[in-house]
Image (cartoon, coloured by chain):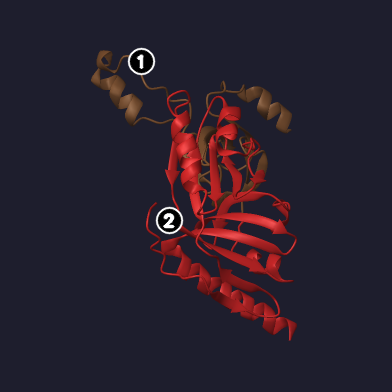
Chain colours: A red, B brown
Amino acid sequence: MSKHISSLAPSVVVDTAAARVAVSQLIGRISLRARGDLAAVGKAIGVELPTQIGACAKAEGIEVACLGPDEWSLLVSLDQIEKVEDALAALYPSLPHSMTEITGREVTFTIEGPKTPDLLSIGLARDVASIKVGQARRTLFDGTTVVLWRDSDTSFRMDVWNSFAPFLATTLETGAKELAAELA
Amino acid sequence: MIQIHCPYCGETLPELEFTYAGEAHIDRPENPSDQTDDQWESFLFLRENVKGPHFERWRHAHGCGRFFNAVRNTITDRFYITYKAGEPRPDLATLLEEDK
């Protein structure tokens, strides 16, 4: 497993009445590119791959988002990641694909609170409402490519590359404070 | 801001998520070694530089990552259609007629 080299340790970035932003615990991540018999891939990793861009699927210890026509992002609990990697490696001879572990590449911000959609709209080019609950999208936030998962109306997770994380944390912190000031 | 329809995502999204990738439907020669210097020059460098409806490539860089084709009016920035890479070139006269 690659070493976690994030400059941001799990912690609360900002906590206001408007929104709370925190850096999540380390979680296993895999970038998967595959074509052809997707059912076989689904069987190997234990969750069916969604084929609609933006759709997600979930099973015990694993979460999948479809980012492109042949691309998926997998969030896997740390105790299962080797099992998933082995299962995909075993599938490789019959179904060539690309599986890259990117655990050390990204951190996740959890963003929740009543003003979360407003907070995201400060940096998001697209309409926050176009991402439905239970979906995920790769998109642009404040000039940075992120993967945004919507868990409920007011709670999101944002996967960010390590090198951009401190910058985006600052953006989110400023935004959350501004929105809280409006509430007060 | 221009709104662009991504044929892979099926969504109409802000221009910021996309990048322009030059003129579309330029096929690489099947036998590159048979080409003359003039043909290579034309393949590599010579472009239509259309004023008006232009067949061009775009990439949904901050989204699904796919290249696709579009017909855009270079004067008004209006997109007549976007379609997946590899699909045949749509008939321009029909497009312009439908857009009226």
Looking at the rendered image, the disc whose residue lies closer to the viewer, 2 or 1, is 2
User: Residue B14: x percent and y percent?
Assistant: 61, 51
The residue nearer to you, when weighing A77 against B82, is A77
The residue that mark 1 highlights is: B30
Q: State left or right for residue A146 relative to residue A121.
A: left
Q: Residue at x 58, y 71 (%)?
A: A22
The residue that mark 2 highlights is: A105
User: Residue A130: x percent and y percent?
Assistant: 71, 51
Q: Residue at x 56, y 20 (%)?
A: B88
Quadrant position of residue B48: top left
Q: Looking at the picture, which amino acid does disc 1 mark?
A: Glu
- The answer for which chain carries disc 1 is B
- The answer for which chain carries disc 2 is A
User: Residue B69: x percent and y percent?
Assistant: 54, 32
Q: Secondary structure at mark 1?
A: loop
- Give the numbered dot on residue B45: none
Quadrant position of residue A93: top left
The residue nearer to you, when weighing A22 against B58, is A22
Q: Residue at x 66, y 44 (%)?
A: A57
